[in-house]
Image: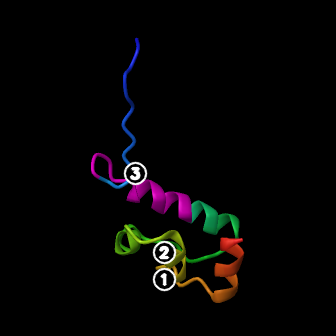
Amino acid sequence: MNYEAIIFDLDGTLWDANKSCTKAWNDVLKELNYKNKITLKGMNSVTGKPMDDCIDGAPAKITDMRILEIKS
């Protein structure tokens, strides 16, 4: 089967990725031994913002030192 186009939906128009993103961030936080978790409600509150803004305003209340570690 040949396709003429592929559609990538990264903004939630066809698929809401927030649930998957919440799980992925919580996997990273767990790997870093961080006890707090990001909730779906918290993820929804930062949807559409640049990633650095999402980390800086992280709903899991990540400390400044941990933010720098995550960004690096």
Q: Residue furthest left?
A: 13
Q: Which residue is mark 3?
A: 10
- Check if mark 2's residue and mark 1's residue have beta carbons within 8 Å: yes
Q: Residues in magenta?
A: 13-25
Alpha carbon distance from label 3 to label 1: 21 Å
Q: Residue 19, relative to residue 30: is it above or below? A: above
In this picture, residue 2 sits left or right of residue 31: left
Q: CA distance from mark 3 to mark 2?
A: 16 Å
Return the mark for residue 57: 1
Q: Quadrant of the N terminus?
A: top left
Q: Residue furthest front?
A: 4
Residue 2 quadrant: top left
Q: Residues within 10 Å of mark 1 (few under 14, many from 20)?
A: some
Residue 12 location (% of width, % of height) = 32, 54
Q: Is residue 33 left or right of residue 44?
A: right
Is residue 19 in the magenta section? yes
Is the C terminus in the top left, top right, bottom left or bottom right quadrant?
bottom right
Picture layout, residue 27 above or below residue 58: above
Q: Which residue is disc 2 drawn over?
A: 54
Query: Considering depth in this image, is 20 or 56 the residue closer to the camera?
Result: 56
In this orientation, does residue 33 appear? no
- Label 3 neighbour load within 10 Å: few <14, some 14-19, many 20+: few
Q: Main secondary structure of the magenta part?
A: helix
